[in-house]
């Protein structure tokens, strides 16, 4: 670590100690890593595939894909079944191109063969938290096998042991019970815990309902379904992404 990184780690240690924080639980996708980029890239490829074979305007096809994805997400959340439902809806829309549209399913399923990169500043942030001595964990509702792949390819064991990774029900947003379960497995109490995430409902509101007062919202995703809901009073908002978390915590920051 550089001298500046060590300075920030020391200030972070003082901050966490002053708050009585012994455990910090992070969301993974789009909080620490660029997951949304992978989704959008593959969705753009699929939209182009459908537009080409149906001789449709790409913008119209993209609009359909966004709508079908949002609707399927309501039922299937982050499971692969969501993409099967999206493709089924496109087949219903363009029955004459059933075969080629079904072939496009592989474009969407390729999402789960890629490990998104770390968001800017994420590795430095995790390193600083490790230097403070607090315990770290991940709470994610992504596909289990994909989570294992991301964890391995990104060498996340440098920061968080696999036993501290909590993969919860992918068919729903994280709930207060999921956060309480993760906290209890670490042997701490909600009042000793800080939660950092980018999903207003599944991370911030659910953690607060679990009794976590130190909730930190990090700007990351643009998915509208993850942005729904009101921040609980006292939530710290980190503008610009995870790379600004340290400066936000060690400097008097606005809360909502």
Image: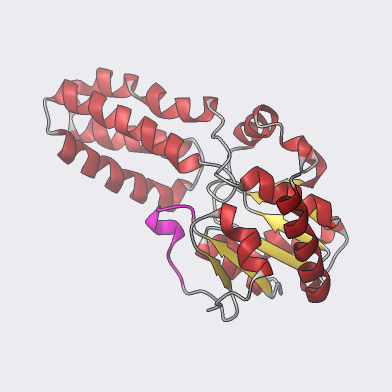
Which is nearer the eye, 47 or 21? 21
Q: Residue 225: say if magenta.
A: yes
Q: Nearer the viewer, residue 18 or 67?
A: 18
Q: Please tell me which residue lies in front, 145 or 43.
A: 43
Specify whether 137 is left or right of 35.
Answer: right
| Badge count | 0
Colour pattern of the rendering: secondary structure
Give residue 54's position: percent from left, percent from top.
15, 25
- 116 vs 50, left or right, is right
As drawn, which residue projects farthest toward the front? Answer: 3
Residue 38, compared with residue 212, is above or below; it is above
Q: Residue furthest bottom?
A: 233
Q: Quadrant of the N terminus?
A: top right
Picture quadrant of residue 179:
bottom right
Residue at x 76% of width, y 66% of height: 193
- Residue at screen point 38% across, 57% down: 224
Residue 125 x/y as whole percent: 68, 51
Q: Nearer the viewer, residue 249 or 232?
A: 249
Residue 87 falls within the magenta-colored stretch: no
Percent of width and height locating residue 206: 61, 67
| Point 60% across, 57% down: residue | 174
The main secondary structure of the magenta stretch is loop
Q: Residue at x 57, y 51 (%)?
A: 31
Q: Is residue 56 visible?
A: yes
What stretch of residues is rendered in magenta? 220-229
Q: Position of residue 58 (x, y in %)?
A: 17, 34
Above-or-below relation of 75 to 39: below
Is 248 above or below relative to 155? below
Q: Would residue 96 be visible to someone looking at this image?
A: no
């Amino acid at each position: 670590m550089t001298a500046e990184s060590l300075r920030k780690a020391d200030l972070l240690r003082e901050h966490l100690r002053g708050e009585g924080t012994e455990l910090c639980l992070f969301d993974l996708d789009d909080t620490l890593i660029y997951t949304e980029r992978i989704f959008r890239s593959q969705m753009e490829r699929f939209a182009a595939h459908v537009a080409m074979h149906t001789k449709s305007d790409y913008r119209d096809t993209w609009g359909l894909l966004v709508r079908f994805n949002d609707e399927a997400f309501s039922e299937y959340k982050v499971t692969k079944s969501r993409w099967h439902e999206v493709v089924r809806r496109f087949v219903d829309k363009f029955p004459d191109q059933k075969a080629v549209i079904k072939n496009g399913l592989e474009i969407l399923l390729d999402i789960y063969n890629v490990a998104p990169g770390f968001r800017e500043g994420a590795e430095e942030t995790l390193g600083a938290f490790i230097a403070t001595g607090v315990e770290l964990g991940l709470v994610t509702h992504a596909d289990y096998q994909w989570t294992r792949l991301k964890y391995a390819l990104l060498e996340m064991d440098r920061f968080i042991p696999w036993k501290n990774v909590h993969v919860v029900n992918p068919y729903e947003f994280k709930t207060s019970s999921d956060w309480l379960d993760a906290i209890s497995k670490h042997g701490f109490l909600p009042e000793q815990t800080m939660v950092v995430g980018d999903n207003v409902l599944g991370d911030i509101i659910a953690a607060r309902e679990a009794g976590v007062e130190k909730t930190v919202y990090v700007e990351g995703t643009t998915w509208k379904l993850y942005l729904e809901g009101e921040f609980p009073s006292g939530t710290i908002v980190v503008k610009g992404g995870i790379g600004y978390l340290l400066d936000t915590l060690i400097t008097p920051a606005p809360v909502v």
